[in-house]
Amino acid sequence: MSRLILAVETTHEYGSLALLRGEELLEEVSLHAPTGFAHVLYRHLADLLERHQLKIADIDLFTAASGPGSFTGVRVGLACVKGLAEALGKPAVGISNLQAVASFGTAALRAPAMDARRGEIYGAVYDAEGRLVEPEMVGPLTAWLTTLPDSAEIVTSDVQIVDRIVRRAPRELAAAIARLAAHATPQDPAALDANYVRRSDAELLWKG
C-alpha cells in the first residue's frame, strides 16, 4: 500500500494541512489563524483524520514547512510534526516554503518570492527538479530582482511585482510540501531544524 503522508504548514497567517496517499491528494485544508496556530492546529488535524477514518498511527511520514516565515509559526508546525513522529517512531521531513512555491512554476529555473514584511521578501532560485540554484535570502524586492537570471520564472502568491511576468502559486502549500516530502530523504524527527533565513529580533539586538 502507498505511504500515507501528513503535511503541516503554519508559517504564516494562512496555513494548511494535507493528506497524501502515494501520489493521490486525499484532502488539503486551508487554515486561518491571525493569532497563531498553537491553539487550533490539533483540532483541525483531528477533524481531518476523522473525515478519512484514519488514526494518527496510520501516518507513515510526517512533514512540515521548515520556513521561512513567522518564527512562532515555523516552531509550531515543526514541534507538531517532530512530536508526533517521535512518539510513533515514524520518519519526518522538513520542506522549505520557497521550494514548495517554486514547485508551481513551469520553467527550467523558478524564482519563488514570499512576503517577509518590513518591506522585504524571501526569495531564491530553484531548478525544475527542486534543487537550489541560488541561495535563499531575505531583502528588498527590487534588489533581488536585479540578481535573477533572465530566464528565471518568478513564482509567488503574495508579492506584488510589476513589469515582470509572474506565475501565481496558491496560498495553501501543504499539498505541495507533502509531494516534495514524498521524494525527499526521510529524517530522524529530532534532526528537523527551522529554516528561518532571517535572524530573529532578539539575535539582531544581541549581535548588532
Image (cartoon, rainbow, N blue to C red):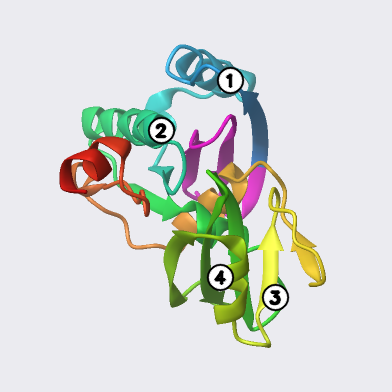
Classed neighbour count for the residue bearing mark 2: other residues with Cα under 10 Å, few (<14), some (14–19), many (≥20): many
Residue under label 2: 77
In the rendered view, would you say 154 is above or below 140? below
Query: What residue span does the magenta drawing correspond to?
Result: 1-25
Q: Nearer the viewer, residue 166 or 117?
A: 117
Q: CA distance from mark 2 to mark 3?
A: 29 Å
Q: Quadrant of residue 113?
A: bottom right
Which residue in the protein does label 4 denote? 144
Viewer-side label of 3, 4 = 4
**Residue 28 at what x, y percent from top left?**
66, 36
Q: Is residue 147 above or below residue 26?
A: below
- The mark nearer the N terminus, 3 or 4, is 4
**Residue 189, image x and y in percent?**
24, 43
Which residue occupies the foreground of this view, 133 or 29?
133
Say which of marks 2 and 3 sits in front.
3
**CA distance separating discs 3 and 4:** 13 Å
Q: How many callouts does the rendering have?
A: 4
Q: Amino acid at mark 2?
A: Gly
Q: In terms of secondary structure, where does tag 3 sit?
A: strand
Looking at the picture, which amino acid does disc 3 mark? Glu
Q: Residue 163: percent from the left, percent from the top?
A: 82, 71
Q: Earlier in the sequence, mark 4 or mark 2?
A: 2
Q: Classify 10 Å Cα crowding around label 1: few (below 14), some (14-19), many (20 and above).
A: few
- The answer to whether mark 4 and mark 2 are in CB contact below 8 A is no
Q: Which residue is mark 1?
A: 34
Residue most extreme to the bottom: 150
Q: Is the residue 31 above or below the residue 190 in the image?
A: above
Of all residues shown, which one is farthest toward the front? Answer: 208
What predominant SS class does the magenta segment belong to? Answer: strand
Q: Earlier in the sequence, mark 1 or mark 3?
A: 1
